[in-house]
Amino acid sequence: MRIISGSKKGKRLHAPKSQSIRPTEDRIKESLFNILGPISPEDTVLDLCSGSGAIALEFLSRGANSAALVDISKEAIEVINKNIKESGFESNTRVFKQNADKVIKYLYGENEKFDYIYFDPPYESHFLYEKIINRIAELSMLKPGGLLIVESDSSFEIKTLEGNLVLEDKRQYRDTIIYFIRNQGD
């Protein structure tokens, strides 16, 4: 696992040893960022269920301003912190060892909104998908035009979206589906 492009291109990243944490494959990550295109130096990122932190670090390497990384696993947080330090992004990141819903509520209380939110919980956590997606909509955590990117296995399907969220695109890579959900609000 590595950073694919940008200022830290080729930087190897550590992965948690736990079988319950499944890093996004490099080929899927590369495809994702090809779809997203250029990242602006003003962009802010929220990486929920961050695992190794690879997605947030890829955003930062490609020029994003800052990233908040969230995971509830102690092992994941240790790996995230190690990857952040070795990549030199300490000043651009905040790490939360907490469940995603509590962090979203906290960030809402701090009046924070994001250009990108990446959400990739354990695939078997189907109950969590709707809860978190609805919470992001309810609290308007995306800036106008912001993008919620949801990674899931092919057994999960997003059926309805709340608020100003609109499904813009969906891509399948074998058993993995990436949903691109845009905030159409102003």
Image (spheres, helix red, strand yellow):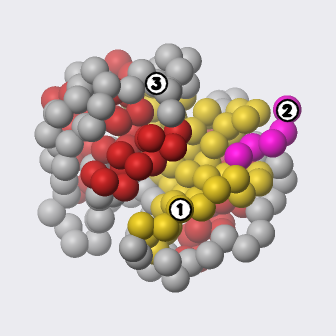
Q: Residues within 10 Å of mark 1 (few under 14, many from 20)?
A: some
* SS category of the residue bearing label 3: loop
Q: Which residue is mark 2?
A: 186
Q: Residue placed at 66% from the left, 70% from the top?
A: 158
Compared to residue 181, the image places residue 132 above or below, namely below
Quadrant position of residue 160: bottom right
Residue type, numbered disc 2: Asp
Residue type, numbered disc 1: Arg
Do the residues bearing badges 3 and 2 touch, measured as CB atoms within 8 Å? no
Do the residues bearing badges 3 and 1 touch, measured as CB atoms within 8 Å? no
Q: Residue placed at 20% from the left, 67% from the top?
A: 18
Mark 3 or mark 2: name the one nearer the start of the chain: 3
Mark 3 or mark 1: name the one nearer the start of the chain: 3
Residue type, numbered disc 3: Ala
Segment colored magenta: 182-186
Residue 121 spot, x, y in % from top left: 45, 64
Horizontally, is 2 left or right of 131 in the view?
Answer: left
Compared to residue 72, the image places residue 172 above or below, namely below
Quadrant position of residue 131: bottom right
Q: Which residue is mark 3?
A: 64
Label drawn at residue 171: 1
**In terms of secondary structure, what is the magenta stretch mainly?**
loop
Tell me, yes or no, if residue 53 can be seen here: yes
Q: Residues within 10 Å of mark 2 (few under 14, many from 20)?
A: few
Cα separation between marks 3 and 2: 22 Å
Q: Nearer the viewer, mark 2 or mark 1?
A: 1
Residue 148 spot, x, y in % from top left: 61, 48
